[in-house]
């Protein structure tokens, strides 16, 4: 490195005024060209559907490449061999990549998430590790998820890009599934019709696709009635809560018992 610096200083001391003027002119033109090329590229890529963070990163990469080209152009005038410069930069890049392997993996994962868009800010997601919540921000290194109880989870993008992601906000409609149990002594058909009528009293439940309400299973102590209805994603939790409350009340008013697990203990007297 010191030998290269000495060679540059020696070359600079021997340069004529005309050569120095040419060098300054080349640098000035190069800087202006870099500025306008990056600006033009930012405008063009800004018209696409890419995330603004991706556009900013792409513009930064282009600026770095153009700077490298400018250095290669002026290097011979300073007495620096281009091959040695490329070798030096390659060795430096290798050392940096080895030292920042995890960070580079997260950076690549962040670019993948921003480009492929498996989720966007504001979506409610769940990852296979068990973390779930609303996406607060998507960075290049990690994604911030805000949980229901207002905790912040910082998930590395490298792990996130290779993980299983469930996006609950991707679709406008969502299927709501509930199971109600009635006793064996009750009329299962009557109970099924009552449950269906009660559910359809809520206008937030869609009529198309048609609600599915059927006797689904004969359990150990109850007849299980499965209900599948479609609602707007934003109404999911409110409709579910209201449906459970209203169906329970309707069954009780109709005299239909809702069984629960019981333990019968019998005592036998030995003679």
Image: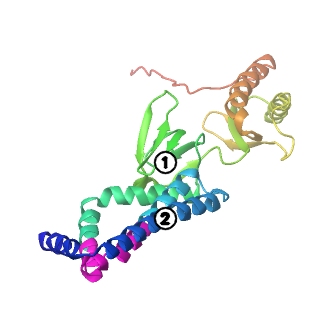
Q: Residue at x 50, y 33 (%)?
A: 147
Residue 64 horizontal side relative to residue 174, left or right? left
Of 75 and 245, the residue lying toward us = 75
Q: Which residue is mark 1?
A: 127
Task: Examine the rendered structure and indicate whether residue 169 appears above or below residue 264.
Answer: below
Q: Is residue 172 magenta?
A: no
Please state the extent of the stretch shown in magenta in the rendering: 66-90
Which residue is pictured at 43% across the width and 64% down the height? 28
Q: Is residue 189 left or right of residue 13?
A: right
Residue drawn 42% across and 71% down?
26
Q: Nearer the viewer, residue 25 or 131?
A: 25
Query: Residue 214 in the image: x percent, y percent?
Result: 78, 42
Q: Nearer the viewer, residue 164 or 123?
A: 123
Predominant SS of the magenta segment: helix
Which numbered circle lies on residue 34?
A: 2
Report helix, strand or loop for mark 2.
helix
Callout 1: helix, strand or loop? strand
């Amino acid at each position: 490195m010191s030998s290269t610096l000495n060679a540059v200083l020696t070359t600079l001391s021997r340069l004529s005024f005309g050569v120095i003027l040419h060098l300054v002119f080349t640098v000035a033109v190069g800087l202006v060209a870099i500025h306008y090329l990056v600006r033009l590229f930012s405008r063009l890529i800004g018209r696409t559907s890419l995330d603004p963070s991706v556009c900013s990163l792409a513009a930064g990469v282009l600026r770095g490449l153009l700077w490298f080209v400018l250095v290669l152009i002026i290097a011979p005038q300073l007495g620096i061999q281009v091959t040695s410069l490329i070798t030096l930069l390659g060795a430096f890049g290798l050392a940096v990549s080895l030292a920042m392997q995890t960070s580079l993996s997260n950076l690549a994962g962040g670019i993948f998430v921003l480009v492929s868009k498996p989720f966007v800010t504001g979506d409610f997601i769940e990852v296979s590790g068990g973390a779930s919540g609303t996406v607060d921000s998507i960075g290049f290194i990690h994604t911030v998820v805000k949980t229901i109880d207002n905790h912040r989870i910082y998930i590395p993008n490298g792990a996130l890009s290779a993980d299983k992601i469930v996006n609950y906000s991707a679709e406008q409609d969502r299927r709501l599934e509930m199971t109600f149990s009635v006793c064996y002594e009750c009329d299962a058909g009557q109970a099924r019709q009552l449950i269906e009528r009660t559910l359809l009293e809520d206008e937030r439940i869609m009529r198309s696709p048609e609600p599915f309400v059927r006797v689904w299973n004969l359990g150990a102590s109850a007849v299980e009635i499965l209900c599948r209805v479609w609602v707007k994603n934003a109404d999911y939790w409110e409709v579910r809560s209201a449906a459970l409350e209203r169906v329970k009340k309707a069954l009780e008013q109709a005299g239909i018992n809702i069984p629960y697990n019981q333990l019968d203990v019998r005592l036998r007297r030995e003679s």
